[in-house]
Amino acid sequence: MEEEEEIDHEYLTIGTRSSPLLDDHDQESGGDGNAPPRKKLRLSKEQSRLLEESFRENHTLNPKQKEALAFQLKLKPRQVEVWFQNRRARTKLKQTEMECEYLKRCFGSLTEENRRLQREVEQLRALRVGPPTILSPNSFEPLQASNLTMCPRCERVTTNSGNASDKCPFAGKTTNKQVHHHVLLHSRQPWAAC
DNA sequence: TTCTTACCAACAGTTACGTCA
DNA sequence: TGTGACGTAACTGTTGGTAAG
């Protein structure tokens, strides 16, 4: 760990052909297209600590803060700026990875739930031997459920084929409303349009 | 008021260096 | 000792906001 502190930060001057981090003197010494190899700065522990501390307070810096921090860290403002840009990018990447993991887990549990429901549907299908039936309230004979309709007003059940006058209290009445109800209930055009 | 231009900051994507297994 | 993976400093190009003309 101590070795990191021993890095000679002086020699690690950054720069390439067009590096904004090079001052004029460095650019000149760079010469005509023969760009010196890019040197990479390694921040000291103290520098990293201060940058992290500053980042916790603010994820962006205004020019004054940038200047002050750069002065404090003995770095160029551009280096501080770059560090903050990269730090924001790392934060975002980490968040995205966490969201990705969360969505994967959701997908897994939903897939499992889907499988379970599919199995349940299969089991229910296997139990069903014929078309669903219900017992007639009058004759207690089994009636095919597909032939039954329920009046939304009186909530009584009748067969589509017809004569329900004995079951519906509104059947046979003579007011418009009641006739309407009766027609709706016992016609082939059910009450959907009502 | 609207349009154009220049400038700047932030970002996404990429490159390249240093380190480590 | 060479090598590939990885972390990250630094770079490039794009975009959106803003002020001045």
Image (cartoon, coloured by chain):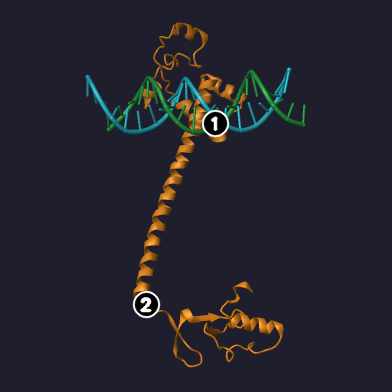
Chain colours: A orange, B green, C cyan
Q: Which residue is mark 1?
A: A54
Measured along the vertical axis of the image, is residue A107 above or below residue C20? Answer: below
Q: Nearer the viewer, residue A193 or A119?
A: A193
Q: Chain of mark 2?
A: A
If the image is split into quadrants, where does the C terminus of chain A sit?
A: bottom right
If the image is split into quadrants, where does the N terminus of chain A sit?
A: top left
Q: In whole angstroms, how far apart are the C-alphas of marks 2 and 1? A: 68 Å
Q: Position of residue B9 (x, y in %)?
A: 59, 27
Q: Position of residue A120 (x, y in %)?
A: 37, 69
Measured along the vertical axis of the image, is residue A1 above or below residue A179? Answer: above
Q: Residue at x 47, y 26 (%)?
A: A46
User: Could you tell whether C17 is left or right of A94 in the image?
Assistant: right
Q: Which mark is residue A152?
A: none
Hey, which quadrant is residue A34 in on the image? top left
Kind of residue indicated by mark 2: Arg
Q: Nearer the viewer, residue B20 or A99?
A: A99
Tag 2's secondary structure?
loop
Q: Residue at x 39, y 19 (%)?
A: A7
Q: Position of residue A178 (x, y in %)?
A: 67, 84
Tag 1's secondary structure?
helix
Q: Which residue is mark 2?
A: A128
Measured along the vertical axis of the image, is residue A91 above or below residue A184? Answer: above
Q: Looking at the image, can residue A166 be seen?
A: yes
Instruction: Look at discs 2 and 1 and give the one toward the viewer.
Output: 2
Kind of residue indicated by mark 1: Ser
Q: Residue at x 56, y 79 (%)?
A: A188
